[in-house]
Amino acid sequence: MDTDSILTKKNHLLNFADGISASNKRFKIINKRWRGVMKSGMIEAGRMKKDAAKMFEPLIQDMQATISQYELIQTQVTDAVFMEMAKKAISQIYDAAGFTINILKRNLFERTADVGYLSTDGEIIEFLKYANSNNDKDASLEEKKKKIRTRLAEYQFEYTVYNEIIILDVAGNILANLNPENRVSFSKDPLLKQTQDIDLHKNIDEDKYVETFRPTDLMPGHGNVLIYSQKIEDPKKRIALGTLCLCFDFEDEIAGIFKDLKQGNENIICGILDEKGVVLSTCNTKVLPQAKRVPVKIDAEFTFMNLGGKEYIMSTVPTEGYQGFYGLTWYGLAMIEMGHVFSMDQNNDVFEKETIVEIQNYFKDLANIKNRSDLLLEDMKRDGLNGIIQAIKFQDKTFVEIIKYIEEIGTEINSIFNLIFSNLMQTVGTSLFNELQFRAFQGNNIADRNLYERANDVCWWALTPLFRETLTRRETGTFEDQDSQNLRERLQYINDLYTPYLRLALTDKAGEIIAVSNPPLGVEEHFVENNLPKGQEFIGTKIDKGLLAKTMALPSKQDYAVTDFLSTPLYGARPTYIYSTAIRDSKNISKIVGTILIVFDAEPQFKEMLMDILPRNEDKKIIEGSFALFADRKKTILASTSPEYPVGSILELDDNLFSLKNGERGASIITLTSRTYAMGMQVSAGYREYKRTDGYRNDILSMVFIPM
């Protein structure tokens, strides 16, 4: 964090720091009294005999020096309170803005793969080929439209992030769409030509889809609509057949993100801005209305803005991108009203003495200030005792009273100082714990959203016509070598689009692998045992009997199975999740003809998620000695950023830490392998229907550690 920027705005920020201003006023009043009493002492010493005055003058000088040093420390502690509370507020809004835009972009990255895959769907291609060659009044065409709408509904059932899916021919005629209330038949939207102009085969690095966010005649009356469109081609003739438009439920997704952020600090207002700073969505339309334009200053961690007669401190943050995807130029915004920036009552955490000691050890500069204050108080007590002894010796009752009054003032100053310091420790401690809890929450939020997509993928790919028809032929004994080739090519096409997987595989009813993809480009195999199969060597091998039995027993096409986080030959004998479901007969959905397995590339995927949530210092560098991990309720580590805590090892932590309810957060000071850490944690809560209403249970604890 750029502390210089905070210091340059210090005077302005202090206008809203009522608690700090009140402390400064109390100090000034007491210091004035203290100096007044000291002046009285000097006057009294001037009336004394020479030998008595010589005894008291050094004492008075020491006390004057003590006053000056105390005033310096008072300034330092109030400056420290100001700086820590300012950093707390700025860090909160900066992190919230970054979380808002980055979690959204992670989600939208998946949409780019979806549109690429669905635009090559066999049933959609056959539907368009028929529609393009037959009259619109053809009764058979109407039946095919009903069938394709059913297919789109099946897709939307799996991928609930879409609120409309539209299939158009090259002329812009809408041949089928998902939402019956969206009664559109034709579109002149320029995105259609832009989509059709893309050569799907020319440049492998060029995006094949178009991302659009604005009002459109494809969904009239809906305001801004986020659409991912891609050309649909005849795969053999490479002739354009039409356009696929996936309409993302932007407002619903953003509402979920805002709801998650509210758990951290209810005073923070978040939003999404376009490249011009226009508000696209906001969690508080009364304060920050849609379509309002706000300043975008991505080169500054914070700035100020007036809205509705109130001033706010705000951050605007660009996306960090995800796997090379940045999408439309949008920014995350978060802001907090200035009246809440220096509130000490945002949280009700009251730390025990032992915790306060550890927090002091972590914030060493603050601890040094407190130690210096304690030493000065001891010096003052010693000087006071010496002064009283001398005053009694010379029978000067007036000076005795002066020194006692000075001692009372010193005690009062120390009492105020201790109160301020205690509040400061509560503030910085709460800030530290909140940050760690928020980062832990981020880890699980990212993981749940990611794995939600995996559950969707496996169920949808199981409905691929090629898979169902080919495995049905295998059941009837008409399976040919070319079928194997076709299956492998299709699996490879999918795997190259969806890079979170190491491989995909198809099996027959007996569990024998009949087709498998190679790892996508740029993804390498890793083995922890020798002589394990790789690539196409898996053909003919059999999958785990337990996984096969679980998959074959699934009651419907919407159900899926997930392995425990265990080692598997399909992942080089490393632990991962394998998602699976049944492949069903092409003409009889109740008959199972095989299975599909998708092997999650857990090691790099989880590692990247955890690296993203590690705490950072003011220079944006990872704090030395900090680490993050995922663990289950049995204390087994599933992923880690630290080689000292490898996957599969057991965390030696208190059982109570693993008993939090789903979605709950916690933070504490813990000891692990003889070292003390501040730790924040959160238990996974799922995302949309995933791990909430779909029957799957898998509680994961996200944990973040900072050495104390």
Image: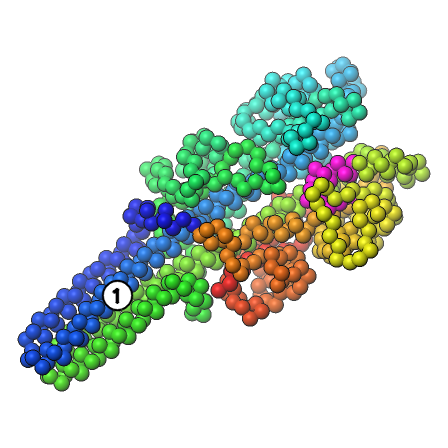
Instruction: Find the magenta span and give its range.
Output: 490-507
Residue 500 versus residue 634: which sits nearer the camera? 500
Q: Is residue 51 above or below residue 449?
A: below
Residue 585: image location, x then y, percent = 85, 38
Nearest the viewer among 548 and 228 is 228
Residue 76 occupies quadrant: bottom left
The amino acid type found where label 1 is placed reads Tyr
Which of 111/198 is in front? 198
| Residue receiving disc 1 | 70
Circle 1 Cα neighbour tier, 10 Å, few/some/many (<14 / 14–19 / ≥20): many
Please state if 368 lies on the left or on the right of 612 as rendered: left
- Residue 492 part of the magenta segment: yes
Q: Is residue 690 magenta?
A: no
Give the answer, above or below, for where 184 lies relative to 267.
above
Residue located 12% across and 72% down the image: 41
What secondary structure is marked by label 1? helix
